Amino acid sequence: MKAAPEDQAILLDVQRLDNDITRLAHRISSLQKGEHLTELGTRAAGLRRQLAAATGDVEDAERDLARLESDTATAQARIERDTTLLQNVGSAKDAAGLQNELDSLNRRTNDLETQELEVMEKLDQLRARVGDIEKQLADIDAERGRLMGVRDDGIARFEKDRVAAVQSRADVAAKVPADLLALYERQRARYGFGASLLQGGVSTASGVALNNSDLASIRAAAPDDVVLCPDSDAILVRTAESGL
């Protein structure tokens, strides 16, 4: 294929813009994936499971406390009843029976009050645990909100740059002859690069220095010959800095 050297040189601008478009698309994709946001979401889900379990523990402890308070109230009511009966009892035998029951009820009340204190201490710890988890969740939600704002701003900025690069690419590509552009597109689709600058004997697409045999073949080619890079298969653009 033949193409004017200046037309071949334009392909370097097309390739540069294609690289920019690919880079911007990758950045947009990375932001859309939001790996850190996903990590925070995973942490939040774990904390919600912990919160559900901790809340259940609080509810269990509250039920235990309510039961103990009810049992204590019942025992105290019986103590008040028996105390009144003891004051009015007529026989020593009945008095002894009531006193025994009162002693038993007082022991029972003391045990219940001790259990209440233990459950109340446990309940305070469980409620503190719930509060700590809720704070962690609130902090994560705040951080997620901030990161989502940063992500959305970044996506909007990169998308604006990408659209501008796509338009610039279309404008520059329009200056390239159709057959040359078609070859560029085909090579880029196959190998990742459509054009490569030969700079000091090195193909910029592959980063590899061409050997003497390849350089000799390139030197023998006419300026308007379209030459492919032996390493990257991109169109090899020759300029004054190619070292030929």
Image: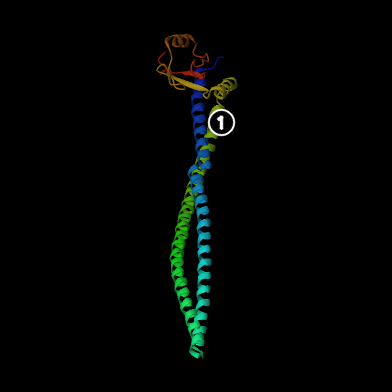
Question: Picture coordinates of residue 204 (x, y %)?
Answer: 44, 22
Mark 1 highlights which residue? 170
Between 54 and 3, the one lying in front of the other is 54
Question: Picture coordinates of residue 222 (x, y %)?
Answer: 50, 11
Label 1 SS: helix
Q: Callout 1: few (<14), some (14-19), or many (20+) C-alpha neighbours within 10 Å?
A: few
Name of the residue lying farthest toward the front: 93
Q: Quadrant of the C terminus?
A: top left
Question: Picture coordinates of residue 182 (x, y %)?
Answer: 59, 22
Q: Quadrant of the N terminus?
A: top right
Who's the residue at 43% across and 21% down the image? 207
133 vs 219: above or below:
below
Question: What sort of colour scheme is used for the picture?
Answer: rainbow
Question: Picture coordinates of residue 130 (x, y %)?
Answer: 47, 59
93 vs 104: above or below:
below
Who's the residue at 59% across and 20% down the image? 179
Between 55 and 102, the one lying in front of the other is 102
Between 58 and 175, the one lying in front of the other is 58
Q: Residue type at mark 1?
A: Ala
Between 87 and 35, the one lying in front of the other is 87
How many marks do you count on the picture?
1
